[in-house]
Amino acid sequence: MDHERPDPTTTDVIERQGAFEDRDAWPVKGYCRIERALDLVGTRSAMLVIRELFYGGTRYEELTRRTGLSEAVVAGRLKQLHGDGIVERRPYQEAGQRRRDEYVLTDRGRALFPVIVALAEFGDVVSDDPRTGVQLVHRNCEAPLAPHVRCGEGHEVPLDQAAVRLRDEEHVTALRDRSRAQR
Amino acid sequence: MDHERPDPTTTDVIERQGAFEDRDAWPVKGYCRIERALDLVGTRSAMLVIRELFYGGTRYEELTRRTGLSEAVVAGRLKQLHGDGIVERRPYQEAGQRRRDEYVLTDRGRALFPVIVALAEFGDVVSDDPRTGVQLVHRNCEAPLAPHVRCGEGHEVPLDQAAVRLRDEEHVTALRDRSRAQR
DNA sequence: CCCCTGACTATGAGAAACCATAGTCAGAAC
DNA sequence: GTTCTGACTATGGTTTCTCATAGTCAGGGG
């Protein structure tokens, strides 16, 4: 089964380990957390709303205006993100105004910070005009932000030192075989 | 339903600096690099194809099977990603087979590594079953990978120390005013 | 030469995302 | 009460994304 390929020079990718080495032995759905993430924030509108929340926008009217999305889309997205626990509604009241809600990121939502930074960084890479656009920086030292990948041991991990494997190998193997037998 | 008193200062977000402090003074389009990134990889299919490329898939047939996408979508996505400089076509030939092309990430494409890690990490946060799914780890020490945000000075930057500002403030201000005058 | 295989393409149809417009509805102001 | 404002909702249409099916096309094998 393992047929060796003509090595396409140095193409570094993420190394597959363990039972996941045979990637085709695993169904396409439900085994990668990236899919799960895309289910929640995989649309353009979700990302734009989240961006504005990170930029400090909190109110419905702000969010529609600053994302350029239509009201219906923003309302629907906020409802979905609220249901997914990414944004939280907070009542507020300004003098002489009625009580309203504003939207802020939950802890879950703030967990998207590295995603935002990574996307912005990639946007830099594929941008053609270095003079335009906004830039994320460290509040104090003003140096630009960049995403880094580290492991639990504290090592900086470049792409060619990364690997991917199944989490609880016995557990998921049993799950897979059971669902196969059912067919 | 049980908490009153909204204190807006407890909500940490990215601080806006300089001319961007008045965020409404800037058009919604063209000033954020995240948008640019989303133009290239903002669809589900693009992300899934890129994931499989990172996981070591290189061939058309592999990519369709492992993403679960239809052939037409994968072909179209590969064409677009090729046009955007994210994937590269490499000819190869197996014994007794005709010459074919395989697809590998370019440097630009590999720049998406932090995005992949960040999305996978977020997928973890919003996942409910810690025993299933795949896990990104350091190839040697097997410790799980996580994205970190650092500034150019090497400081670790949490969300509440991040800021956003315009890149070349004079330049983009001039651009904006000119395009406004044209209207 | 014809056949076969695997990488693509073409087409049509359905779903999802999105927009623009026109509403509804709660509550503070009057 | 009546008005008004701003947060939403409802409707319909357009675009984009995606799938399923059925092709085409190149080239190696016979």
Image (tube, coloured by chain):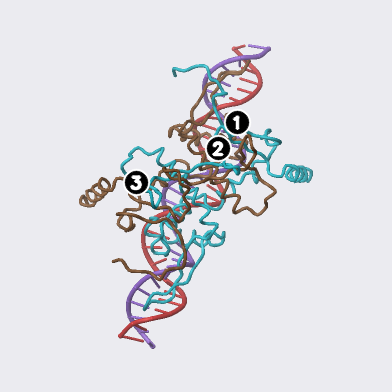
Chain colours: A brown, B cyan, C purple, D red
Classify 10 Å Cα crowding around label 3: few (below 14), some (14-19), many (20 and above). many
Query: Which residue is at the front of the view, A67 or A138?
Result: A138
The type of residue carrying mark 1 is Glu
Is residue B160 toward the left or the right of residue A167 in the image? right
Is residue D25 toward the left or the right of residue B160 in the image? left
Is the residue at mark 2 from the same chain as the one at mark 1? no
- Residue designated by label 3: B133
A138 up-or-down from A5: above or below = above
Is residue B101 toward the left or the right of residue A49 in the image? left
Residue C2 image offset from top left, x and y in percent = 35, 84
The type of residue carrying mark 2 is Val
- Residue designated by label 1: A61
Marked residue chain, label 2: B
- Residue designated by label 2: B157
Element under disc 3: loop
Q: Quadrant of the N terminus of chain A?
A: bottom left
Residue drawn at point x = 47 percent, y = 52 percent: B47
